[in-house]
Image (spheres, rainbow, N blue to C red):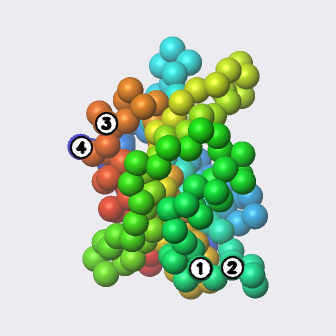
Amino acid sequence: MPSQLYHDEEFGFSFRYPFDWRAQSWAIDGIAVIAMGEIIDDAIPPSAVVRIILFDEEVSGEDVFSASEEEYQLELESMGIRDVNIMSFGIKNIDERKYLFCHFQHTTVRQSTGEDRRVEQINAYFLHKDMFFVVSVSDAPDNFGKNRPVFDSIINSFQFD
């Protein structure tokens, strides 16, 4: 599948995403990047979001890597993510790069209509220097399986300079 490269010089990371998606970035306590597929009939589009989280003095990278599935679910719920159903959770590696992996479904509110929608999502947490890079890929549950190879490719292409 043809892809294009997103590269961020300031934070020193890059990833590949589908050629027919569009990407944009904005500053939110650092940076966030979103690459998104086409919105069809007001459906949830397939998307990938990279957020950079700077550690504070109370939380370290190893704290996150040592979190249990139950602690992770409680953290998601504390952020207002509802009806969390964790499907798989654990530590994985890509070419010697360790990351925390969580595949789950949850309920979100569509901002334009206020209606509840179910979302399926994978979060991959990469530790680099004193920052966490959170790569989140998501889609409507009915489409997630179809787009899973694309999502896996995005996560597997994530790298640091």
Callout 4: SS: loop
Q: Secondary structure at mark 1?
A: helix
The Cα atoms of the two marked residues, 1 and 4, are separated by 37 Å
Q: For the residues labelled 1 and 4, say whether their Cβ atoms are less than 8 Å apart.
A: no
Q: Mark 3 and 2 residues: CB-CB less than 8 Å, in contact? A: no
Q: Earlier in the sequence, mark 4 or mark 3?
A: 4
Q: Which residue is mark 2?
A: 59
Closer to the chain start, of discs 3 and 2, is 2
Q: Vertical placement of 15 versus 62: above or below?
A: above
Residue under circle 1?
63
- Residue identifier under label 4: 1
Give yes or no for contact between labels 2 and 1 (Cβ–Cβ under 8 Å).
Answer: yes
C-alpha gap between disc 1 and disc 3: 31 Å
Q: Amino acid at mark 1?
A: Asp
- The residue that label 3 is drawn on is 145
Residue at the (74%, 58%) spot, across then down: 28
